[in-house]
Amino acid sequence: MSGGGFALPAAAVFANRRRHQDMELVPVPLAEAKAFVEVWHRHLGPPRGHKFSLGLRHADGVLVAVAIVGRPVARGLDDGRTLEVTRLVSDGTPNACSRLLGAVWRAAKALGYRRLVTYTRTDEPGTSLRAAGWRRAAELPPRGDWHPPRQPGRLGPARVRWEAP
């Protein structure tokens, strides 16, 4: 991994919370972003691909948060001008997720995209999204598993689609 890695014990990270002003926005290679998701994301593994990934690195080189941005998973949204934040994860550093949400929207607009969406489960409050100015765009019911042979009849959680301001 480049840039000092991120594999600190959780106790060390939480005992020494990073200050917002001591963090630098950095591009993150997909392999490093996926590894970070594997360690820190609560309920999803890493996505297959991306258009770009951004992270926040503390002054000591430790990666504290990652946003992975790719094409929309929903075919109806994949119009060539829309992107989706497919994963957003931090080690618990305050304000890291809301800062990344603002940064990925600015980056997407700079690349010519007009719309940026993401999803949360309905049991998640969306605090970072609200703090970054995103709005709830739709509430979506549970859907069937996309891979029926693995687990027939299994429904995923109900979701909320959010859109960047």
Image: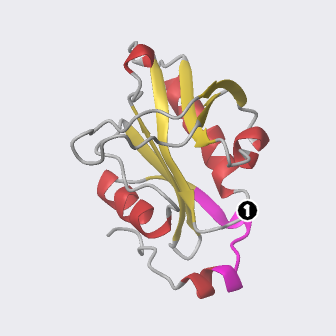
Magenta span = 14-24
Q: Residues within 10 Å of mark 1 (few under 14, many from 20)?
A: few
Question: Would residue 46 appear left or right of 108 to someone viewing this image?
Answer: left
What element does badge 1 sit on? helix
**Where residue 132 sits: x, y (%)?**
73, 39
Q: Residue furthest left?
A: 149
The answer to which image quadrant residue 35 occupies is bottom left
Residue beneath the point at 73% across and 62% down: 21
| Residue placed furthest toward the front | 153
In which image quadrant can residue 144 be found? Answer: top left
Position of residue 119 measured from the top left corner of the image (x, y, whole percent): 56, 37
Give x and y (percent) for residue 22.
68, 67
Residue that mark 1 sits on: 21
Of residues 89 and 74, the one drawn nearer to the viewer in this rendering: 74
Residue 9 is inside the magenta segment: no
Q: Which quadrant would the C terminus be assigned to in this image?
A: top right
Quadrant (top left, top right, bottom left, bottom right) of the N terminus: bottom left
Viewer-side residue, 153 vs 76: 153
Image coords of residue 105 (percent x, y)? 59, 32
Indicate the colouring scheme.
Answer: secondary structure
Amino acid type, label 1 = Gln
Q: In the rendered image of this protein, does residue 100 appear above or below residue 161?
A: below
Q: Nearer the viewer, residue 132 or 148?
A: 148
Tally of numbered tags: 1
Q: Is residue 97 above or below residue 77?
A: below
Query: In the rendered view, would you say 87 is above or below 22?
Result: above
Give me the residue at 59% from left, 71% from top.
Answer: 59
User: Which residue is located at x 51 percent, y 73 percent?
Assistant: 62
